[in-house]
Amino acid sequence: MTVTIRPAEKNDVQAVAGLIEEIERFYGTAESDIQPPDERLAQVEEALFGTPPLASALVVEDELKELYVRDPLRRQGTGPRLMDELRAVAAAGVLRRTAQDGHRRGP
């Protein structure tokens, strides 16, 4: 199976928003705290493609999100490939990472 990792494009907004909701549910967010889909779509689009963009995302063309890899792609090197791509993006000065304490790290 070939897995492609690329920067998110505008036509990925719905998929990224859906993955965010899936992550919230995975971590047990209460139903009442899950953002309505139309609000989430607008927020993701603004964050990724606003002027200036507030975030960037990599898309794996096959079932990878966050750093959680779904069962069908586990043990195929998808996680390490994503990390390699993230390192390359960070080395190019494109990526900033925010630590859990909220302090910015990286370029």
Image (cartoon, helix red, strand yellow):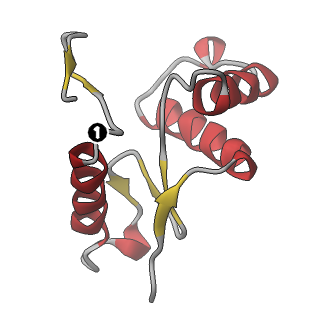
- Identify which residue, 107 or 79, lies in the foreground: 107
In front here: 72 or 87?
87
Query: From the viewer's perspective, is residue 42 above or below residue 61?
Result: above
Tell me the kind of residue under disc 1. Gly
Residue 77, how many percent across, how many down? 25, 75
Q: Quarter of the image holding residue 22?
A: top right
Q: Is residue 79 left or right of residue 18?
A: left
Element class at badge 1: loop
Pointer 1 residue: 93
What x and y, as percent, mark residue 54?
A: 51, 22
Q: Nearer the viewer, residue 68 or 103?
A: 103
- Quadrant (top left, top right, bottom left, bottom right) of the C terminus: top left
Q: How many marks?
A: 1
Q: Quadrant of residue 52?
A: top right
Q: Is residue 55 left or right of residue 51?
A: left
Q: Split into 4 quadrants, where in the image is the N terminus?
A: bottom left
Q: Residue at x 60, y 43 (%)?
A: 16
Work out which residue is located at the far bottom of the displayed protein and give it.
Answer: 1
For label 1, count other residues whose C-alpha is less than 10 Å away and answer few (under 14), some (14-19) or many (20+): few
Q: Residue 15, relative to residue 21: is it above or below?
A: below
Answer above or below: position of 30 versus 74.
above
Residue at 31%, 60% (x, y): give it: 82
User: Residue drawn at (64%, 37%), measured in percent from left and top?
Assistant: 17
Seen as rendered, the residue at the extreme right is: 38
Question: Does 46 sit left or right of 67 as displayed?
Answer: right
Pinpoint residue 36: horizontal percent, then vertical percent: 75, 20
User: Farthest residue toward the front?
Assistant: 92
Q: Is residue 34 above or below residue 71?
A: above
Indicate left or right for 82 with 28 as reference.
left
Expressed as whole percent of the image width and height from the top left, the position of residue 66 reads 39, 45
